[in-house]
Image (cartoon, rainbow, N blue to C red):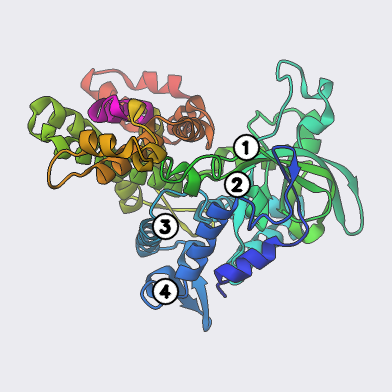
Amino acid sequence: MIRTGAAYKDGLRDGREIWIDGERVKDVTTHAAFKPIVDIKARMYDLHHEEATAPALTYVEDNAVHSIFHQPPTTQEHWHAKRQGVDILLKDVGGVVTRVGDETIGEMWSLQDGRDMLAAIDPRFAANIDNHIKRVVEEDPFHVSANTDPKGDRSRHISERDPDMMVHVTKETDAGIIIRGAKYETAAAYADQAYLKPTVGAWTDEKESDYALGCIVKMGAPGVKHICRSGFAGRTNPDDYPLANRYDEVDTLVIFDDVLIPWEDVFFYRYTKAAQFVRGTLHRYSAYPYVLRLLYVADMMIGAALWNAKQTGLDKLQSVQEKLADLAVYREGINAHLTASIALAEKSPAGLLMPNQSILYAGRVLACSQLPAMMHATRELIGGQICVTPNVAAFEAEGTAEWLKKFYTLNDNWESEDRRKLLAFARDLVSSDYAGHRLAFVQFAQAPHFNHLAAVYKSFDFEGPLDFVRKTAGLSDKVKGSLK
């Protein structure tokens, strides 16, 4: 089954407790800070039902229609279909949305790869992950990921901190476990459920076991409270800030105030080995859609910069072409890593087709670490007019409109209104407070840079280079002993 946009919105009207800017939100589907992004998610649901797009966004199994984003990938064609599906969604909504839903189901696939470990804890837990993946396919919830704890003072041992700084189990009941704590999560306030799992840590100290927890939490469940950061949507005129007013995916501090998690929603708890496994494998699938989103960010930067150069004829200058080529190399580098990770995909322990880990994680490092430089290159190509151009009100007001029309019109092809729109788009893409927020999000949403590099280190096969140098340098076989 695939829900409609209307059914998705109806599901959000469950009495959930949401706060933003000190205000209790009555209806997340109509509030100014949330309505644009909720409408976009609803549109994505509806595209699964439309004649022109449904064939590419759905698949049939056991006479039931499901979203291709939830289909467990066992072939390269499954991955190609998912990528084509993202292309359809993002082009239809006209912008980049990170939380589509395909990124979190991948984290559940990663946990399913460790189902034998879950079965060793409790046979029910292995069955729970299987059942939840099946339920996501069949019921099509908007599924996000609750990952980052407030943590508190990390110079102190976990036993010396406020216990609520990390989500933990406080009680077992016949109905399930009771949890307390908090998590940060994007889009939680307008999602159906979240996959809650341990945050970054060594998970070698048994005193941490109360915090070694993995489960599904319904976002409207009693005791779940959403305290959201200020939204960008509704603060400014959409004509001046077109991206901020449509694509802001509001981040939330989700409070768990003695929340009951039914046993069927528990994957593991009080088991640090499971926490180690989750932290080591969490992004083996979800990094793919995450990096794919940055491909579209690259396309937006290239398009904004090139249109700006073309309107004045500066695209004919070699220096401009070189900077545009830098942007193209960045974009194609992302594309190459995505393509190669599927072309050289590996079978996972659960029998899924897993993107080549070394290549995928290397692509993530490229996409995230080079984004600041590429944003700066885009600003250089567009120039200072993104800083000085007046807002749309001045282009419409009597007394200023005539002058702005005169000085912002370039030729018969580029009149003032098109130029104003391009500059407003470019400003919101690389120079607004929303642009700064998105940059910080990209840098940390799937862990900071050093963790990205650690993932590459752990997944890269160093044996080939070592053996090549050993043979070329004429080293003896004795040096192999140092590898143990």
How far, Cα to Cα, is label 2 from label 1?
A: 8 Å
User: Which one is in front in this view, the residue at disc 4 or the one at disc 3?
Assistant: 3
Dots 3, 1 in contact, CB < 8 A: no
Q: Left or right of 22: which side holds 54?
A: left
Along the polypeptide, which appears first: circle 3 or circle 2?
A: 2
Magenta stretch: includes residue 375: yes
* Three-letter residue code for mark 2: Ala
Residue 207 position, x and y percent, is 81, 29
Residue 407 position, x and y percent, is 22, 33
How far, Cα to Cα, is label 4 from label 3?
A: 15 Å
Residue 270 position, x and y percent, is 79, 41
* Three-letter residue code for mark 1: Ser
Mark 2 element type? loop
Residue 393 position, x and y percent, is 41, 40
Magenta residue span? 370-385
How far, Cα to Cα, is label 3 from label 2?
A: 18 Å
Tell me if mark 2 has few (under 14), some (14-19) or many (20+) residues whose alpha carbon lies within 10 angstroms of its own: many
Along the polypeptide, which appears first: circle 4 or circle 3?
A: 4
Residue 80 location, quadrant: bottom left
For the point 18% across and 33% down, which residue is it? 325
Using the image, tell me which numbered label, if any, was put on residue 33.
2
Mark 4, residue position: 54
Along the polypeptide, which appears first: circle 2 or circle 1?
A: 2
Along the polypeptide, which appears first: circle 3 or circle 1?
A: 3
Dots 2, 1 in contact, CB < 8 A: yes
* Three-letter residue code for mark 4: Ala
Mark 1, residue position: 230
Residue 14 location, quadrant: bottom right
Mark 3, residue position: 93
